[in-house]
Amino acid sequence: MRQLALSLLVLILALASVLSAAKDETVDELKARFESAHPEDRPAVAIRIAQHQLRNADKLYSDGDVNQASSAVEDIVTYSEKARDAATQTKKHLKNIEIDVRRIAEKLRDIKRTLAFEDQPPVDKAIRRLEDIRTSLLKEMFAKDNKKEKK
């Protein structure tokens, strides 16, 4: 019994270290992983990149580095689009990606409120594009239901 408990503890610790190592991946590592990921894994990796870049953009705007923050915002949109495309292609994770994109857009709205007026247009444009992504995801999710009802 003690042997089993010890083995289980070692397994849990090993799993925790693997998970924490995965969370510490840099954006560049995630981007490389996205390119080599299986199609069904791509939506999750792409949305992680977008979330990571969201945190980076928030920090960069707080630090006053508007140019790099704008670049991070563009990455947010790009990888949100890639997540949408991958989810649509595989027909998996549509709901989760839509929820994540909505949360990202909400956070960008919060960030936008803290910016000077002249720094807001790139963020505003990104929010509109994220809403377009959400709309296309919602259409895809409900298009499947409509096809089932018509049969």
Image (cartoon, rainbow, N blue to C red):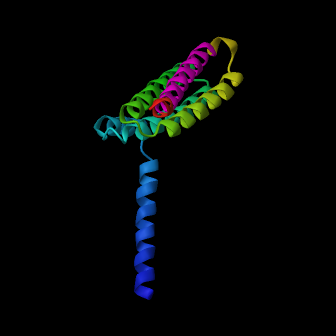
Q: Nearer the viewer, residue 67 or 90?
A: 90
Q: Nearer the viewer, residue 105 or 31?
A: 105
Question: Quadrant of the image for the C terminus?
Answer: top left
- Please report the residue visible at 40 percent of the width from the left and 58 percent of the height from the top: 18
Q: Is residue 125 magenta?
A: yes
Q: Position of residue 8 (x, y in %)?
A: 43, 75
Q: Is residue 136 above or below residue 119?
A: below
Question: Quadrant of the image for the N terminus?
Answer: bottom left
Q: Is residue 3 left or right of residue 120?
A: left
Q: Position of residue 120 (x, y in %)?
A: 64, 16
Q: Is residue 13 left or right of residue 32?
A: right
- Please report the residue visible at 53 percent of the width from the left and 29 percent of the height from the top: 138
Q: Position of residue 63 (x, y in %)?
A: 61, 29
- Please report the residue visible at 65 percent of the width from the left and 27 percent of the height from the top: 111
Q: Is residue 120 above or below residue 58?
A: above
Q: Nearer the viewer, residue 78 or 98?
A: 98
Q: Is residue 145 above or below residue 23?
A: above
Residue sitting at the far left: 36
Q: Which residues are magenta?
A: 120-144
Quadrant for residue 126, please give it. top right
Quadrant for residue 89, please give it. top left
Q: Is residue 74 magenta?
A: no
Main secondary-structure element of the magenta-colored stretch? helix
Residue sitting at the far right: 113
Q: Position of residue 35 (x, y in %)?
A: 31, 34
